[in-house]
Amino acid sequence: MRTWISARIKQYHKEGRALRTETTINNTRDFGIGKLLKNLPALRQIGFQANRRLLDVQKISHDCSIGEDAFDRVVQPAEVDGQRTSALRFGDKRVQALFTVLVIFSFQLRGFTNSEMRVLLAQLLGFDPANYPVGKLTYDLRRLRLHGIIERISHSHRYQLTAEGLRIALFFSRTYARLLRPKLAEIMPVARQARPHSALHSTVWNRKSNSEAKRSGLLPKLDAFELQFLRQGL
């Protein structure tokens, strides 16, 4: 995986026994560090952080299921220290685009800025980044921050995902893009053959939703609440 700087991370199976993760830094100046040997400990720490960030994302990506309480906190309005903010509704086009962009930024050690996020978000929503209102994204960043999904990096105008925020972003974006949208087309033709609101309709629906959730491998530990939500949402 290459980054915008002259560094890259690669993974491979060492002698077919273990997964090895390596970060290669070609230009130390990209990180504000000189090239003298005395700087090796600092470079080693940067490499370790990059490896750990990638592995953490991969681990959560493998099982990004969340519980009912965490889901409710996101899809309902929140109040933190007297500050109120609106809900982040599952399925809302703008909300889903926000979570998709957050997943993209999850690998960046330096976090992201309003302007960096605005470029990608505008493109996902079909707008010209140059004309996308700054105030609209500022409002969204405030929502994400008060919901505990992102946090501001100290002494900067940059943001980063929280540990819980990464799990939520992966769950929302993957459930919507990989399960809800593509599988709806497969489930509905079968369900429509049954009489609306009939027992047969419910049985077909339940079997198909269970089957697709398991077969997709998206949510290996999908709990009862999440599965029920998907049935109702579809």
Image (cartoon, rainbow, N blue to C red):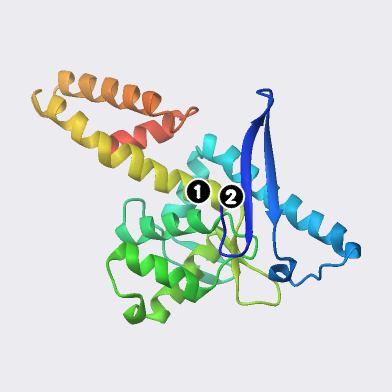
Residue at the spot 35% in from the left edge and 69% down from the top edge: 122
Q: For numbered disc 2, what is the local secondary structure?
A: helix
Q: Quadrant of residue 80?
A: bottom right
Compared with 93, 130 (above or below) is below
Q: Can I make out residue 157 in this image?
A: yes
Kind of residue at disc 1:
Ile
Q: For numbered disc 1, what is the local secondary structure?
A: helix
| Residue, disc 2 | 164
- Taking the image as shown, residue 71 lies to the left or right of residue 163, namely left
Residue at the spot 61% in from the left edge and 65% down from the top edge: 5
How many C-alpha atoms fall within 10 Å of the one at disc 1: few (<14), some, or many (≥20)? many
| Residue, disc 1 | 168
Kind of residue at disc 2:
Glu
Contact, mark 2 vs mark 1 (Cβ under 8 Å): yes
Q: Quadrant of residue 226?
A: top left
| Label disc, if present, on residue 105 of the rendered structure | none
Residue at the spot 48% in from the left edge and 51% down from the top edge: 169
- Taking the image as shown, residue 208 lies to the left or right of residue 171, namely left
